[in-house]
């Protein structure tokens, strides 16, 4: 195995099952240099993406070993991997890991310094802990979904960003790294309960705060940041494309009004919410007079906070993102580059997404298994 680079170089993580937020957490940590070993099933589950594995970027950077966790030989091998790891990630329903014999008590018994991260939607306890669910269900319960959408219309699912990845993967990564830092000081590991309901609720901290202050109405599409404000919105242009405007501050708002040619249009005060419908209508009419790219060119350098709404195909070609290298191409697949950036120990994509079991022998060898032991695992059908 090539020597990884990045601030997490030398950190070893075992990823025990799970879809969506668990492997994405693994990908984030791998991008920053961690050696992430993903334990895949011998046969695919119905939770994966119906695409060739090389396009499943949730799995990038990780090495894969395929195991039959119903075999005692496989469980014993997992325990040897865990014994040499800094952290483990588990994404089963509560209690499933314990039934397999790879729960936190068993893992901490062989590695007292281990940080054991548990990724679920509902959490390890509570009335819904054993219920199935997905991102949309978790953000429904925490108020996130209710807050997103146009006035008078149904809520709009924000892809699976707020639950799976924002409220799940990122909070799990934060928890694991915090636990590793603490374990190096105390010599003791612990369990990190990362629930998407908790994480997505945490992401709403600002909104819950200003709602408590009476500033935020508990309705969609009528507030400053949810599409209610004309100066923080999206508008169609003459060519059927769109631009976004985020002119919250008064100086940026004034610049935008001048750019749109609306200085003498009799607009109400910027913060007079009763006048927002008229203001929105004026903005919409103005934006329809030019194409998206014409507006972008006109707004350049004007500090009006107007940007193009780019498609997935267009975004990697945006001059600013190209200059920063925000997207990279790996084996013909365009994808986001590692983030955040480090001045002295930059991260890197260690390898493209692996096929299940692609690195089984390599992983076992790196973690101290002899050739005879690897052969024995294969003969027992514990490893594929």
Image (cartoon, rainbow, N blue to C red):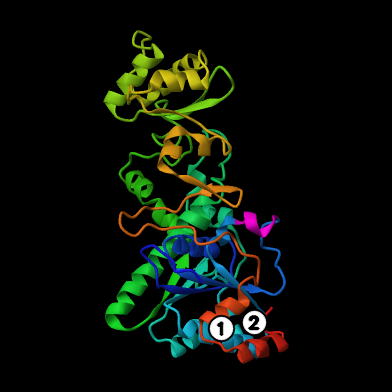
Name the mark nearer the viewer: 1 or 2: 1
Q: Which residue is mark 2?
A: 69
Q: Are marks 1 and 2 in contact (CB under 8 Å)?
A: yes
Q: Is residue 350 left or right of residue 70?
A: left
Instruction: From this view, report whether residue 273 is shown above or below residue 41.
Output: above
> What span is in magenta?
51-56
| Residue 182, x across and y down, in percent | 31, 75
Q: Residues within 10 Å of mark 1 (few under 14, many from 20)?
A: some
Image quarter in which the C terminus is found = bottom right
| Residue 177, x across and y down, in percent | 37, 68
| Residue 105, x across and y down, in percent | 47, 86
- Asked if residue 37 shows in the view, the reply is yes
Judge by depth and name the residue closer to the eye, 162 or 255: 255
Q: Which residue is mark 1?
A: 78
Element assignment for label 2? loop
Reading the chain from its start, which is encountered first: label 1 or label 2? 2
Q: Residue at x 59, y 22 (%)?
A: 240
The picture quadrant where one finds residue 190 is bottom left
Magenta highlight on residue 54 = yes
């Amino acid at each position: 195995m090539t020597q990884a680079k990045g601030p997490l170089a030398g950190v070893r993580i075992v990823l025990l099952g799970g879809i969506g937020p668990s492997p994405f957490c693994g990908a984030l940590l791998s991008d920053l240099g961690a050696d992430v070993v993903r334990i895949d099933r011998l046969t695919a589950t119905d939770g994966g993406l119906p695409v060739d594995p090389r396009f499943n970027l949730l799995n990038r950077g990780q090495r894969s070993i395929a195991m039959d966790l119903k075999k005692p030989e496989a469980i014993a091998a997992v325990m040897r991997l865990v014994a040499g790891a800094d952290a483990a990630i588990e994404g089963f329903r509560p209690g499933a890991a314990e039934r397999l014999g790879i729960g936190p008590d068993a893992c901490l018994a062989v590695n007292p310094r281990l940080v054991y991260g548990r990724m679920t939607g509902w959490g390890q306890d509570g009335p819904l802990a054993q219920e199935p669910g997905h991102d949309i269900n978790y953000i429904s319960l925490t108020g996130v979904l209710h807050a997103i959408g146009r006035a008078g219309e149904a809520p709009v699912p924000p892809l699976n960003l707020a639950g799976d990845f924002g409220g799940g993967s990122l909070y799990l990564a934060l928890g694991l790294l915090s636990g590793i830092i603490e374990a190096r000081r105390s010599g003791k590991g612990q369990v990190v309960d990362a629930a998407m309901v908790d994480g997505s609720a945490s992401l709403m901290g600002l909104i819950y705060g200003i709602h408590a202050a009476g500033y935020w109405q508990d309705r969609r599409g009528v507030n400053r940041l949810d599409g209610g404000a004309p100066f923080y919105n999206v508008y169609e242009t003459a060519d059927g494309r769109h631009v976004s405007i985020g002119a919250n501050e008064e100086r940026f708002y004034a610049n935008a009004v001048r750019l749109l040619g609306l200085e003498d249009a009799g607009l109400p005060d910027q913060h007079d919410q009763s006048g927002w419908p008229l203001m929105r209508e004026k903005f919409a009419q103005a934006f329809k007079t030019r194409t998206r790219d014409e507006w972008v060119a006109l707004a350049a350098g004007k500090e009006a906070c107007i940007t193009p709404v780019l498609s997935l195909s267009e975004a990697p070609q945006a001059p600013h993102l190209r200059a920063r290298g925000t997207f990279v191409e790996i084996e013909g697949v365009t994808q986001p580059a590692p983030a955040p950036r480090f001045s002295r120990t930059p991260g890197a994509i260690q390898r493209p997404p692996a096929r299940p079991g692609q690195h089984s022998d390599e992983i076992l060898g790196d973690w101290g298994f002899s050739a005879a032991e690897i052969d024995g695992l294969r003969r027992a059908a514990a490893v594929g």
